[in-house]
C-alpha cells in the first residue's frame, strides 16, 4: 500500500513537472516567434524605405518611360502617385484598374511628414505588404512595397533552430530536475526505512 502511494505521488510530480516544462516550451517558442517576426518586419521596413529613397532619386532624374524599364529585386512593387492621388505607374498592376491612392496610410503619412512606412494588406494584389512612401518636391509620391510572404521563409529558417535549441535546453533542465527529484525521493525512502528500524 505504501509503495503504491509513493509511486502515485511520484507520478503526480512527474506529470506536474512535465506540464510546467511544456508550458515553458510553448511560452518560449511563442516569444521567440514574435521576436523574430518583429525583427524581420523592422529590418524589412528599413530596407524598403531606403529603396523608396533610391527610387525617388531615380524618378526625379528620369522620364516616366524609364520607369517601365526599371527592374526591382525580390518581388518589390514600385508605384508612382500623382499629387491628386491617381496612380501614374505601378510595376505589378494595370494603372487604369487602380483607385485613388491618396487615402493609403503610407501615402497620407508621406504627404504629412515626407516619408511613410506601414504594414498592411494590399487589396490590389491580395497579399500582405510593408509599404514605404517618399514625397517628391513636385508633390508626387514614390512608393515601394515588399511582400511579407517572401520574408516568412526567413522567419521559418530562424525559428526552427531556435525551437530546437529551446527544446534541448528545457529537456536538459527536465533531466536535471528529474534526477534531483529521484535523489530526494530516494533520501526520503531511506529516512523512512531508518525510522521504521
Image (cartoon, grey):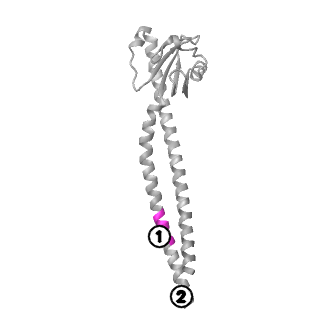
Image quarter where the C terminus lies is bottom right
Q: Is residue 63 visible?
A: no
Q: Residue at x 42, y 13 (%)?
A: 67
Sequence-wise first label, 1 or 2? 1
Look at the numbered disc 1 and give the secondary structure of its residue: helix
Image quarter where the N terminus lies is bottom right
Callout 1 touching callout 2 (CB < 8 Å): no
Indicate whether 159 appears above or below 11: above
Is-magenta flag for residue 180? yes
Residue 44 image point, x, y percent: 47, 31
Dominant SS in magenta: helix
Q: Residue at x 41, y 41 (%)?
A: 157
Q: CA distance from mark 1 to mark 2?
A: 22 Å
Crowding at dot 2, Cα within 10 Å, few <14 / some 14-19 / many 20+, comes out as few
Q: Is residue 12 visible?
A: yes
Q: Nearer the viewer, residue 41 or 122?
A: 122
Magenta part of the chain: 174-181
Q: Quadrant of residue 15?
A: bottom right
Q: Residue at x 55, y 22 (%)?
A: 123
Which mark, by number, is residue 33? Answer: none
Indicate whether 38 appears above or below 62: below
Residue 3 image point, x, y percent: 54, 79
Which mark, by number, is residue 194? Answer: 2
Is-magenta flag for residue 152? no
Q: Is residue 156 left or right of residue 107?
A: left
Q: Quadrant of residue 135?
A: top right
Look at the numbered disc 2 and give the secondary structure of its residue: helix
Disc 1: which residue: 179
Residue that sits furthest to the bottom in the current view: 197
Amino acid at each position: 500500500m505504501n509503495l503504491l502511494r509513493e509511486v502515485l505521488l511520484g507520478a503526480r510530480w512527474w506529470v506536474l513537472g512535465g506540464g510546467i516544462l511544456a508550458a515553458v516550451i510553448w511560452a518560449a517558442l511563442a516569444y521567440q516567434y514574435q521576436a523574430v517576426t518583429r525583427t524581420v518586419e523592422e529590418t524589412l521596413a528599413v530596407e524598403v524605405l531606403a529603396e523608396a529613397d533610391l527610387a525617388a532619386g531615380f524618378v526625379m532624374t528620369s522620364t516616366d518611360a524609364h520607369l517601365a524599364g526599371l527592374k526591382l529585386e525580390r518581388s518589390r512593387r514600385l508605384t508612382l502617385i500623382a499629387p491628386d492621388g491617381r496612380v501614374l505607374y505601378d510595376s505589378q498592376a494595370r494603372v487604369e484598374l487602380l483607385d485613388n491612392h491618396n487615402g493609403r496610410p503610407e501615402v497620407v503619412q508621406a504627404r504629412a511628414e515626407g516619408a511613410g512606412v506601414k504594414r498592411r494588406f494590399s487589396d490590389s494584389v491580395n497579399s500582405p505588404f510593408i509599404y514605404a512612401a517618399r514625397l517628391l518636391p513636385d508633390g508626387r509620391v514614390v512608393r515601394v512595397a515588399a511582400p511579407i510572404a517572401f520574408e516568412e521563409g526567413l522567419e521559418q529558417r530562424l525559428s526552427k533552430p531556435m525551437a530546437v535549441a529551446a527544446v534541448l535546453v528545457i529537456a536538459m533542465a527536465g533531466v536535471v530536475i528529474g534526477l534531483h527529484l529521484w535523489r530526494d525521493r530516494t533520501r526520503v525512502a531511506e529516512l523512512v526505512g531508518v525510522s521504521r528500524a
